[in-house]
Amino acid sequence: MHTFLMKFHYTSGSWARIMKVADDRTVAVRALMEAVGGRLVHIWWDVGTCSGYTVAELPDAVSAAAVLAATAKTGAFTDCEAHELLTEDQLHDAILLAKAASDVYSPPGKMAAEVALEGLSAPRRTPR
């Protein structure tokens, strides 16, 4: 399973409905995560922005995208984000892979910069 942090912002209409009937959103979110083969770990609320944060274990990024699509279609949110979280061991593995791959990647414009540098080092002709 992969761990995802999901951040969401309710619309003002959603907040108005929550104020009328304060149902337990954990039940709905847990059901959604289980429907895609995952598990809800926890939900937290950000006092400063009225945002919500969910941590869930999901099979893969496709499952996370399905959760976002299912929630977005309701119109209850102004935006939703999903971020896959890495453990310390996974980060270490990613760094090792990055080191191995860094020699094969060249940044955009590198060839143009090299050509420009070659032009600067070429002998200059003096006009007659």
Image (cartoon, helix red, strand yellow):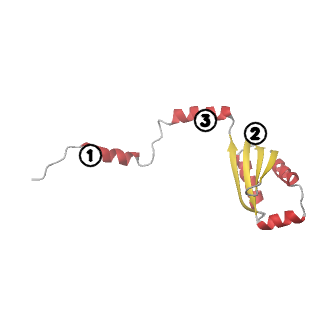
Would you name the residue on which mark 1 appears? 120
Residue sitting at 31 percent across and 44 percent down?
117
Q: Which of marks 2 and 3 is in front?
A: 3
The answer to which quarter of the image holds residue 28 is bottom right
Q: Where is residue 33 in the image (x, y as percent from the top left)?
A: 81, 49
In the image, 66 versus 22, the foreground residue is 22
Q: Which of marks 2 and 1 is nearer the N terminus?
A: 2
Q: Which amino acid does label 2 sit on?
A: Met
Q: What residue type is labelled 3?
A: Ala
Would you name the residue on which mark 2 appears? 1
Residue sitting at 81 percent across and 64 percent down?
15
Would you name the residue on which mark 3 appears? 94
Residue 16 in view here: yes
Residue 37 in view here: no
Q: What secondary structure is marked by label 1?
A: helix
Q: Say whether residue 28 is left or right of residue 118.
A: right
Separation of residues labelled 1 and 3 (CA atoms): 39 Å
Q: Earlier in the sequence, mark 1 or mark 3?
A: 3
Q: Where is residue 65 in the image (x, y as percent from the top left)?
A: 71, 52
Q: What secondary structure is marked by label 3?
A: helix
Residue sitting at 67 percent across and 31 percent down?
89
Q: Say whether residue 124 is left or right of residue 49.
A: left
Separation of residues labelled 2 and 1 (CA atoms): 54 Å
Q: Nearer the viewer, mark 2 or mark 1?
A: 1
Q: Position of residue 95 (x, y in %)?
A: 58, 34
Q: Earlier in the sequence, mark 2 or mark 3?
A: 2
Q: Are marks 1 and 3 in contact (CB under 8 Å)?
A: no
Compared with residue 85, is residue 76 higher up or lower down, i.e. above or below?
A: below
Q: Position of residue 116 (x, y in %)?
A: 31, 48
